[in-house]
Image (cartoon, helix red, strand yellow):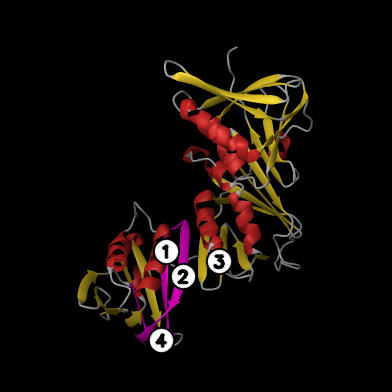
Amino acid sequence: MKVVCSQSELNTALQLVSRAVATRPIHPVLANVLLTADAGSNRLSLTGFDLSLGIQTSLAASVQISGAVTLPARLLGEIVSRLSNASPITLAAEASGEQVQLTSLGGNYQMRGLPADDYPELPMVESGMTLKLHPSGLVQALKGTLFASSADEAKQLLTGVHLRFNARALEAAATDGHRLAVLQVEDALQDEAATNDETSEDFAVTLPARSLREVERLMAGWRSDDPVSLFYDRGQVVFLAANQMVTSRTLEGTYPDYDQLIPSQFNRTLVLDRRALVAALERVAVLADQHNNVVKFSSQPEDGVVQISADAQDVGSGSESLPASLAGDAIQIAFNVRYLLDGLKAMGPNRVVLHCNAPTTPAVFKPEESEKAFTYLVMPIQIRS
């Protein structure tokens, strides 16, 4: 293999695929990236794969000899990132692939690789479900829900985001057992987007949040209106956008029926300015972080004001007053301030509605302008009077 390519493009590609390289590989080759040079297309393809998440991308290159090799991801990434972008990089590998030489300007580096034949193949979906998604709709759905997924591997199904497709709409949901984020995007799919062996009327899949963060990162930098293809078959999903691909296993099991968790009626409603609420919570959080992250909301309907307070024992206390439109009885209710800030920052509109019933029952935050699109349920924290 012998290939000449741009330092900046190679560096960008390495940073992308390295996020799918195993940190504790069960086999030495899984700590490597796969480089495949094709003289026919004059492209260099890079792949990272940890057997669960796979990322592949390619870049234009001058390929003098086709071939493939795997190289240590961390070592290669650190060398390439430090090389000058004023000079192209030449990669040359022996036929055996064990010794690779990297040349740039006056620099010359040798690395020991492993044969490409040892690298596991990325799972490819050859049949089953195919969907065409608008990149902006997919990014919107993921940004509004990923933060609410669980980090507890013991709750494996909750470490993912549940994606439900119906006609042209996409509904994304994530919960960690203490909070729930549900976002509906009406025009996330193209017309006649599904071509499949099964019906697309109500197709749902749960994918690991780690995989979807890479999809979101990929789509956020996507500078095209071309659709993103989603392929699904037998526990595997592939997202394909131009020359970049993310593959992910699915999370098996029945996702919680989250619709049943959201109360249908509320007897208390507060409407607040979202930015003012976020700013007040961030100030009060300085004290709340000192003691259990708890902030308390207190309202009196006749006052037209909501007081947000935190009491850190032996450290201090603080409170903020915000104007609000109030309906229903007075209430005192407490929340984890970090949960509130995560959800409020994911909402776009300027005003937010807090619906609640009692200090111990689920509270729901919604943007006032589009209440049907985004729902953020948070379980309150019990406080002693």
Q: Which residues are magenta?
A: 42-69
Q: Main secondary structure of the magenta part?
A: strand
- Marks 2 & 3, CB-CB < 8 Å contact: no
Q: Tell me how far mark 1 sits from mark 2, CA to CA.
A: 7 Å
Residue at image point 57% right, 64% down: 239
Residue type at numbered disc 4: Ala
x, y percent for residue 173: 64, 46
Residue type at numbered disc 1: Val
Q: Tell me how far mark 2 sits from mark 4, CA to CA.
A: 17 Å
Residue at image point 53% right, 50% down: 208
Name the secondary structure under disc 3.
Answer: loop
Res 257 seen here: no
* Dot 2 or dot 3, earlier in sequence: 2
Q: Which numbered marker is on residue 222?
A: 3
Q: Which numbered marker is on residue 8?
A: none
Residue at image point 45% right, 74% down: 58
Q: In the figure, is residue 191 to the left or right of 56?
A: right
x, y percent for residue 225: 64, 70
Mark 4 or mark 3, which is nearer to you? 3
Q: In the figure, is residue 134 to the left or right of 326?
A: left
Residue at the spot of label 4: 39
Name the secondary structure under disc 1.
Answer: helix
Q: Is 43 or 49 nearer to us in this picture?
A: 43
Name the secondary structure under disc 2.
Answer: strand
Residue at the spot of label 1: 17
Residue at the spot of label 2: 57
